[in-house]
Amino acid sequence: MNKDDEKVIDYTNTSEFMTFELGAMKYAIELPKIREILTYPDNITPLPNISNWVKGLINLRGEVVPILDIRIKFNISEGSYDENTSVIAVITEDKRMIGIIVDLVDDVQRLDTSTLAPVSEMGSAIPSKYLKGYVRLDNNEMLVIMDIERVVAKEELTD
């Protein structure tokens, strides 16, 4: 391999993202916000008088973590639970840990955030105020970057 074959990667505007699937779309969350990935837990304690997209609470190593099914919140899919269903435990800026249910956790990708394009209201099942934008991947697939802070904001949990 000579020097011309090497692809030079400029890491200045890049960040690592965890990609996952919700319905037919691929989404991503910044890797530093993710604490861990769990298989869908059987031991979720349901809460009374709460939105149907809040599945309940789990105990994750001594920390009480609410589990949210954003597929239900955004009417993406009925929310079937199978062996691919996972929970991504995210840490918010105000240090809350919250688990979000996804259909399938994909992988970690380094993305050039300077190429982020705005998502129009028609571009995603999720309203654009919950999204940072999207990037086109090398295979021409669209990857939508979720603004996880907005999705799990305290005000959102009370609706």
Image (cartoon, rainbow, N blue to C red):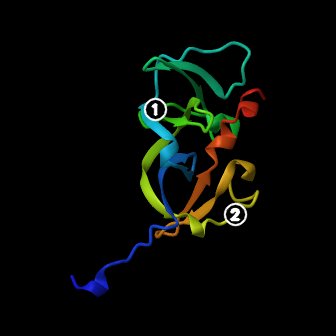
The reply to whether callout 1 and callout 2 are in contact (CB within 8 Å) is no
Classed neighbour count for the residue bearing mark 1: other residues with Cα under 10 Å, few (<14), some (14–19), many (≥20)? few
Secondary element under disc 2, as helix, strand or loop, is loop
Q: Is residue 71 shown above or below 11?
A: above
The percent position of residue 83, horizontal first and vertical second, equals 41, 33
- Between tags 1 and 2, which lies in front? 2
Q: Which mark is residue 82?
A: 1
> Between residues 75 and 158, which one lies in front from this camera angle?
158
The percent position of residue 105, horizontal first and vertical second, equals 45, 44
| Tally of marks | 2
Q: Amino acid at mark 1?
A: Asp
Q: Is residue 125 visible?
A: no
The quadrant of the picture occupied by the C terminus is: top right
Secondary element under disc 1, as helix, strand or loop, is loop
Q: Is residue 104 shown above or below 43?
A: below
Q: Is residue 81 shown above or below 104?
A: above
The quadrant of the picture occupied by the N terminus is: bottom left
The residue lying at 61 percent from left, 32 percent from top is 69
Q: Is residue 40 visible?
A: yes
> Between residues 97 and 26, which one lies in front from this camera angle?
97
The percent position of residue 51, horizontal first and vertical second, equals 72, 24
Q: Amino acid at mark 2?
A: Pro
Question: Alpha-carbon distance for marks 1 and 2?
Answer: 32 Å
The percent position of residue 117, horizontal first and vertical second, equals 65, 66
Q: Which mark is residue 7?
A: none
The residue lying at 38 percent from left, 77 percent from top is 8
Q: Which residue is situated farthest in the left direction here?
A: 1
The residue lying at 71 percent from left, 31 percent from top is 154
Classed neighbour count for the residue bearing mark 2: other residues with Cα under 10 Å, few (<14), some (14–19), many (≥20)? some
Q: Which residue position is annotated with label 2?
A: 118
